Image: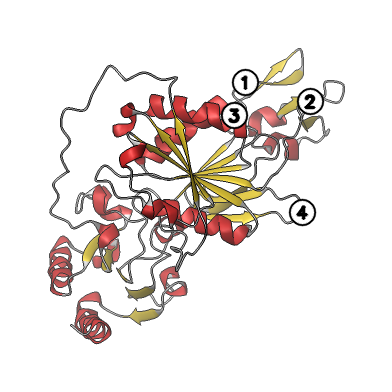
Amino acid sequence: MKIKVISSQCNGCTLCIKKCPIQAIELQDKKAVIQDACNFCGICISICPQKAIVKSIDDEVIAPVTNQYWVMIEQKPDGEIDSTSYEMIAKLRELNSSAHITGVFLCSDSSNQDNSELLSSGADEILLLHHPAFQNYNPLLYTNAIVPICKKEMPSIFLFPATEMGRDLAPRIATELQTGLTADCTELSMDAENGLLIQTRPAWDGNLMASIICPIRRPQMATIRPHVFPLPENVARECTVRVEQIDHITNPPEKIVERSSIQSSFPDLEKQNIVIGIGRGIGTKENLALVCDFARSIHAGIGCSRPLVDNGWLPHEVQVGMSGKAIAPKVYIALGISGSVQHLVGMQSSEYIIAVNKDENAPIFQHSHLSLVGDIKKMLPVIKDLIEKKTGQ
């Protein structure tokens, strides 16, 4: 697909040049010409008074939509499977109950691989790609292993977790397959008319939600934010394992000598049942220390919105939101957080949300299960009492 100018209709008004957000249109011989930098946003099409700018598919054949879906199953360095993989499988099953879902998993030794967890993932099939070099993640090796099989079988959909690995690997594979990729999706749906996957993600700094399709090329690819979909419960589905020995790649020249965890004074947010999210409504840095002590007293993790990281009050590792982490604790307590879209995408999957804010019209109250209007310091004893009753502590 591309955008082109019908020269006979263009009058050289330059309106499209002025409105193009990335300066991808030039005037040549008094006619607008689309440059290679065009990202197909379509603004020029909508504002051209002569209707001289159109989308063109040329002679490219539209690939068919099938029920063959792939999901990348990611294994963390400690051997744990990233739960986002299971969340994606469950979501695809919800969208299309008749789909054949394949979980793609790379390992260094298939003979010693414990497949019990993979078999209960909810997928119909596990495609096990193995090679000794897969002991540690290497983007080039993983790409070279996956792309040939994907070209051969050409699934209709291929999803990746929006983790460090997924964000690195997915665009490499999409480039090799010459297909589109939507990054950091927070919602998926299906077009009932044509079966295309509608991939939704925040855009323009979170001020709007963009719904994106890939109408021509396959597979339809996307990375999915962790914890935006619920984990499946009581998965009971017959699943088979297909092993593929990868012979066409060689061991990388580099090797990992040592691996050590990053030391932090803050507990891992993704593993906390209770998380306190702190916003700039907390007021002062002294109040921050008070809230941190309170969090420890109720055994809660500490998260925050972006302003506190920008101010240097808390590290980026505890930031929750679009440019931070996505979490889904049992209880999320938002203290002094207004409720911008940028923050909501990181905590909206929490089971129970308590919000405290002086502003009774704060947007966060539209998403909370319990809304408390008032001074944060005065509300902390109330919250502690609620948590103790809820948890029996």
Q: Residue at x 28, y 61 (%)?
A: 280
Q: Residues within 10 Å of mark 1 (few under 14, many from 20)?
A: few
> Within 10 angstroms of label 4, few (less than 14), some, or many (20 or more) residues?
few
The local secondary structure at tag 1 comes to loop
Q: Identify the residue at image location x=41%, y=58%.
A: 227
Q: Which mark is residue 58?
A: 2
- Furthest-top residue in this view: 29
Please give left or right for residue 274 compared with residue 39 in the image.
left
Percent x, y for residue 211? 61, 50
Q: Which badge, 2 or 4, is on the more N-terminal residue?
A: 2
Instruction: Give the residue pinned by disc 1.
Output: 36
Q: Earlier in the sequence, mark 1 or mark 3?
A: 1
- Up-down relation of residue 247 to residue 108 (above or below): above
The residue lying furthest to the right in this view is: 8
Q: Residue at x 43, y 22 (%)?
A: 247
Amino acid carrying label 1: it is: Asp
Q: Mark 1 to mark 2: distance in Å?
A: 16 Å
> Disc 2 vs disc 4: Cβ atoms closer than 8 Å?
no
Give the label, 4 or 1, closer to the camera.
Answer: 4
Disc 3 packing (10 Å; few <14; some 14–19; many ≥20): few
Query: Circle 4 is placed at which residue position?
Result: 193
Q: Which residue is mark 3?
A: 151
